[in-house]
Image: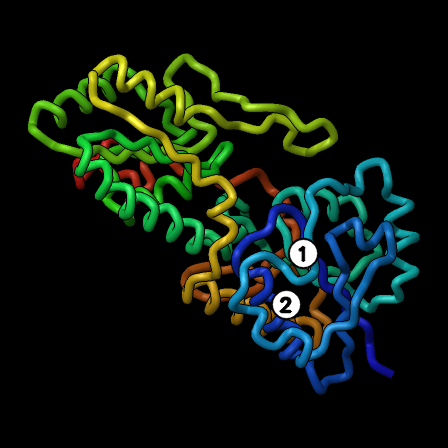
Amino acid sequence: MKKRIGILTGGGDAPGLNGIIESVVRSLAGADFEVIGIEDGFEGVFESRTVSLTAASVAGVHQRAGTMLGSSNKSSTQGRVEEFQKKFAQLKLEGLIAVGGDGTFQSLSRVIQGLKIIGVPKTIDNDLAGTDVTFGFDTACAVVAESIDALRSTAEAHKRVFVVETMGRTAGWIALGGGLASYADAILIPERPFSRADLLAFLKKKQASGQRGFMLVASEGVAAENEMASIAFKVEGSHQKERYGGFSETLARWIEDETGWESRHMVLGHLQRARHPTTTDRFLTLNMGVEAAKMVREGDWNKAVVYRDGRVTRAPLQDLMKPARLVEPDHRWVKHAQELGIFI
């Protein structure tokens, strides 16, 4: 009799989720296992919604963004530990492969006792502890870089400043990576509150030099020194109740008022999640899925599949449950930006 192995995708979607699913299912095909997909993250556990996955049913999904199983960041195990354990037992699973971010693993930390879990870290923000990089990040950076490249032509045509807002509540990896890849003129990240006076002086210097266009990329959670991040609205019941937004528009208006340099803003938003995965993310998810399948076959549970020191490897599951990994002040990418003359 085949052992039933569950797989779920939780939290915000990220390019590469389908790659993990296809890689795991195809790696276990023909073995003594049946892979059961749990729909919409933890909601599928609580509501007993599953689907049997086969090599045929997942063939080719690796190239698509999103997740064929659906995902949700609305359900949590908080206050529902006994209910989760009861519902999970009813699924009659040998173990669970959980693909998610900080919210997913925070929820799992409450119910992990007695369960067999393999964790696969996922977030476009690249801020999960325990791994050097998360899949989806490279694709998000590609969206940012390609957008800045495209907008630069219209900025130079009309002598404009463009403020491009990326995702990144507390971590600036996407803005930093995408900004560097596109050689943006300025990069603002939450870990480095900026000086308005210094930014203004930098802008005026570029303007006086005759530069026609100016590209500035900023994380949504950015704030100037002694200021607070811009909150667009709140979502009650979410583990991230405050939703940031609006910074790019107010900064663009401020730049135009202070310099007379015509300014526009662009919020990339969920476009950073919606692009098909890059080749880099496809390779990463392929290898992580194969490794997760090996762990299933070996019975090596309650560990995580991570990327460290240039290769996919295994680590304690608890490593994914530590505080977020932020951009360090002296990170080499920050230094590279400074060496290129980028304001950061």
Q: Which residue is located at x 71 percent, y 59 percent?
A: 8
Q: Which residue is located at x 54 percent, y 50 percent?
A: 130
Quarter of the image for the C terminus: give it: top left
- Residue 134 is situated, as x and y percent measured from the top left of the image, at 50, 54
Q: How many marks?
A: 2
From this view, report whether residue 11 is shown above or below residue 216. Answer: below
Q: Secondary structure at mark 1?
A: strand
Does residue 321 appear to the left or right of 281 in the view shown? right
The earlier-in-sequence mark between 1 and 2 is: 1
Residue at which label 2 appears: 21
Residue 280 visible in the picture: yes
Do the residues under discs 1 and 2 have CB atoms within 8 angstroms? yes
Does residue 93 appear to the left or right of 240 in the view shown? right
Residue at which label 1 appears: 9
- Which quadrant would residue 50 be assigned to in this image? bottom right
Q: What is the CA distance from the residue labelled 1 to the residue labelled 2?
A: 9 Å
Q: Label 1 is placed on what type of residue?
A: Thr
Q: Secondary structure at mark 2?
A: helix
Q: Residue furthest bottom?
A: 30
Disc 2 residue crowd, few under 14, some 14–19, many 20+, Cα 10 Å: many
Q: Which residue is located at x 61 percent, y 77 percent?
A: 59
Residue 332 visible in the picture: no
Q: Label 2 is placed on what type of residue?
A: Ile
Which circle marks residue 296 in the picture?
none
Does residue 161 appear to the left or right of 76 in the view shown? left
- Residue 27 is situated, as x and y percent measured from the top left of the image, at 63, 79
Q: Nearer the viewer, residue 273 or 103?
A: 273
- Residue 2 is situated, as x and y percent measured from the top left of the image, at 83, 81
